[in-house]
Image (spheres, coloured by chain):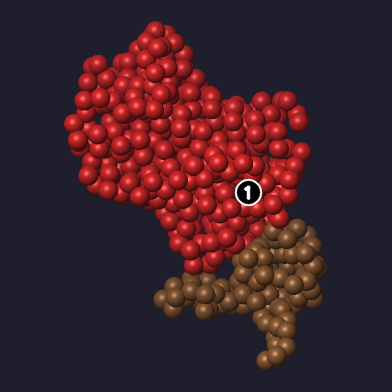
Chain colours: A brown, B red
Amino acid sequence: MRPDSAIKLVSELLDLPLLDTEGKYCGIVDDVELRGQPGRDLELKALLVGPGAYQGRLPAWVMGLVKTIAGDRITRVSMDDVETISSVVHLKRTAGELGLHQSEAAAGRWIPHRGAI
Amino acid sequence: MNPLELTLGIMTAVGGFVDISELVFAAKAGSQFGYALIWVFALATVGIIVFSEMSGRVAAVAKQPVFNLMRHRLGLKLGLITLAASIASNLITCAAEIGGVSLILNYLTGASYMLMAVAMTAVFVISIWVLPFQWIERVYGLLGLFMIVFAAALVAIHPPWNQIAGGFVPQVPAGLTTKELLTFSYFAVAIISAVMFPYEVYFYSSGGIEEGWGPKDMLTNRLTSILGMALGSLLAISILANSAQLFGPAAVDPEIPGTAALEAAIPFGKTGLVLALLGMLFAVAGAAVETCMANAYSISQFFGWIWGRRKKPWEAPRFTIAWILLFLIALSIVLTGVDVMMLVEFAVLFSILVLPLTYLPLLLLAGDRKYMREYANGPVANAFGWSYFAIITAAAIAAVPLFIVTSGGNA
């Protein structure tokens, strides 16, 4: 499915994993950004990724817990950067270029780069 | 299809089938109810074959592991509940496996149980860090084949084969008191849970994706699921039948995991005992690794992190931190001194509660022609899938009341 096709947001997009051009997982479609006016079609503008985008999808006390553990960062991925949507969302750029790599990079600083065959 | 790879895959599945819960419940079931619970093992084995095959097919065609599907199908809220329940279930199971390995090493060497728990957790962490994915899977799985000694022991003691064959027919023994009937029902639920542990499906489907399965691997998936699980289940049934023949008449309750090893000692002496303990050691150690990795896979897939043991540990940093932390938490549960048998009982209880939520999204996706195209479930796979979903849902509803009423089968 192309990103400009008609799409069922909940069953065909929300909570799908994102894959960048290097085939790396770089988050989940946690929420979406829509744009529109009364009497006009709604347009899907961006995918929102990160624990901050859970706001409104979880009870307040769970959201508080999520914020404490994982923070409330949100990364916005424009629909222009989406290549195709199937059982995953394929992106047109790398996670690094889209700002989707920060948490993974931060965790990487704790891991020694040796010892594996 | 590479025949050597296929054979190794099947043998790995056989060696990795039995874990501490199956070991304990098979031995106890045989001792208390003779051959009457064999059919439950057979029923649950067909169930795990159905769902493993489905998860492997989804991995090969939709290229999606179970937890990605779970969140997409169940939504964030219900998905999070399933994730939390699954983490709790797998953590308790992992702790039970670490406890089991430590007990077996304690029998083999006489070294302190707690010291063995720390040492084996270190061995697990180092082996997962250092070894490539296939080596990890194969080393534990293939060495677990020492468990074949239980099947050999069964042949050696000349059991009543007609009664064993009769055990495959669904039955409830006649003349049970209400209390015994409830205990029988609890054992049936526990065996379904132990055989159909959700971690097995998480691990299997994630492994399929790591190995880059595609539609061409459909036959490999089918043969590995069917033959690996069926032959593995025969080992568990051998433990049950040995126990029915040897422990039941002597009124021995195999309360601790080590008792099962005596089944091989009776016909084969010290050699049988050592082989049985080695088989149990590697099978349970493999299960400890699988439960921990399955948990790390689940968390990483749910949140869209980079995951996989085909990658070097530093190439999937959050996944690596997850499995190391999960091992440490499981170890700390063991170090509290909690009884291994209690961990086993809670592991089967938690797992059966998670099973319906684990298998529902898989069932929905495997039947979805949009994702699965011509590889979607046909009428037979759907009939099996939904029938088993009904069985595990009924078992999940009955599990907690039965656990309470029978004090975990010890009433």
Residue B33 seen: yes
> Foreground residue, B311 or B342?
B342
**Residue neighbourhood size for the residue with mark 1, other residues' Cα within 10 Å, grouped as few (<14), some (14–19), many (≥20):** many
Q: Is residue B22 placed above or below B234 in the rendered structure? A: below
Task: Determine the residue located farthest toward the bottom in the rendered image.
Answer: A38
Number of marks drawn: 1
Residue B285: % across, % down: 48, 36
Q: Residue B343 location in percent, x, y?
A: 34, 44
- Residue B302: quadrant of the picture: bottom right
The quadrant holding residue A96 is: bottom right
User: Circle 1 sits on which residue?
Assistant: B366
In front of the other: B69 or B345: B69
Question: Residue shown at 54%/65% (left/top)?
Answer: B75
Relative horizontal placement of residue A22, taking residue B257 as reference (left or right): right
Q: Is residue B407 left or right of residue B116?
A: left
Q: Is residue B15 above or below residue A7?
A: above
Q: Quadrant of the C terminus of chain B?
A: top left
Residue furthest to the front in view is: B379
Q: Amino acid at mark 1?
A: Ala
Q: Is residue A89 left or right of residue B154?
A: right
Q: Is any part of residue B329 visible from this angle? A: no
The part of the image, by quadrant, that contains residue B274 is top left
Which residue is rendered at x = 48% and y = 63% of the image?
Answer: B78
Residue A14 vertical placement versus B267 (above, below): below
Q: Chain of mark 1?
A: B
Foreground residue among B3 and B393: B393
Quadrant showing the N terminus of chain B: top right
Q: Residue at x 71, y 47 (%)?
A: B61
Q: Residue at x 29, y 33 (%)?
A: B184
Residue B281 image position (x, y, % from top left): 45, 30
Residue B340 in percent (x, y) is at 33, 40
Q: Indicate the secondary structure of the residue bearing disc 1.
A: helix
